[in-house]
Amino acid sequence: MKYMLLIYGSTDTQNACTVEDWMAYDKEVQEAGIFVTGHSLADLTTATTIRVDDSGERTVTDGPFAETREVLGGYYVIDVPDLDVALDWAARCPGARDGGTVEVRPVAEF
């Protein structure tokens, strides 16, 4: 089953994860044969948000819409047998440390 690991970091604190931490995790996921896809996202200052109201009028704003101290920094999609295994991989993710959060969601397949 495919799961998306959504990696959120705090905008208030510097994450102590190093590039080497991420490279090691990438290698581990790849070598385990569970990697489907994943990307790091550009800085949140590059985001543009669009909302469409009931009349169809668009409102475009710079930056992310949500007023939050956490930002989505990237994601992995992994293919593992079940949620427990997905949670184990999420717990290993460097983004889960130092105030970060990894949200685990099944990928809906239609």
Image: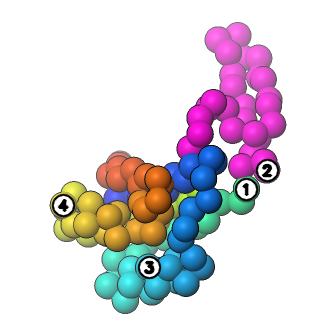
**Of the image marks 4 and 3, the number of the one nearer the N terminus:** 3
Q: Amino acid at mark 4?
A: Asp
Q: Tags 1 and 2 in contact by the CB under 8 Å rule?
A: yes
User: Label 1 amino acid?
Assistant: Asp
Secondary element under disc 3, as helix, strand or loop, is helix
Q: Nearer the viewer, residue 14 or 46?
A: 14
Residue 14 appears in which quarter of the rendering? bottom right
Which residue is label 2 attached to? Answer: 46
Which residue carries the number 3 mark? 25
Q: Is residue 6 visible?
A: no
- In this rendering, the answer to whether 51 lies above or below 80 is above
Residue at mark 1 to residue at mark 3: CA–CA distance = 21 Å
Residue 64 among those drawn in magenta: yes
Kindly identify which numbered label has been placed on residue 60.
none
Which stretch is magenta?
44-72
Q: Are marks 4 and 1 in contact (CB under 8 Å)?
A: no
Which comes before the other along the chain, label 2 or label 3? 3
Residue 43: mark: 1
Q: Is residue 61 magenta?
A: yes
- Measure how far apart labels 2 and 3 are at the Cα level: 26 Å
Find numbered disc 2 in the image and state the secondary structure of the residue it sits on.
helix
Q: Position of residue 1 (x, y in %)?
A: 26, 62
N-term mark: 4 or 1: 1
Earlier-in-chain disc, 2 versus 4: 2
Are there few (<14), some (14-19), or many (20+) residues within 10 Å of tag 4? few
Mark earlier in primary sequence (1, 3): 3
Q: Position of residue 93 (x, y in %)?
A: 41, 68
At label 2, the amino acid type is Thr
Q: Give me the residue at 37% from left, 89% from top.
A: 31
Q: Residues within 10 Å of mark 1 (few under 14, many from 20)?
A: few
Secondary structure type for disc 1: loop
Q: Position of residue 83 (x, y in %)?
A: 22, 57
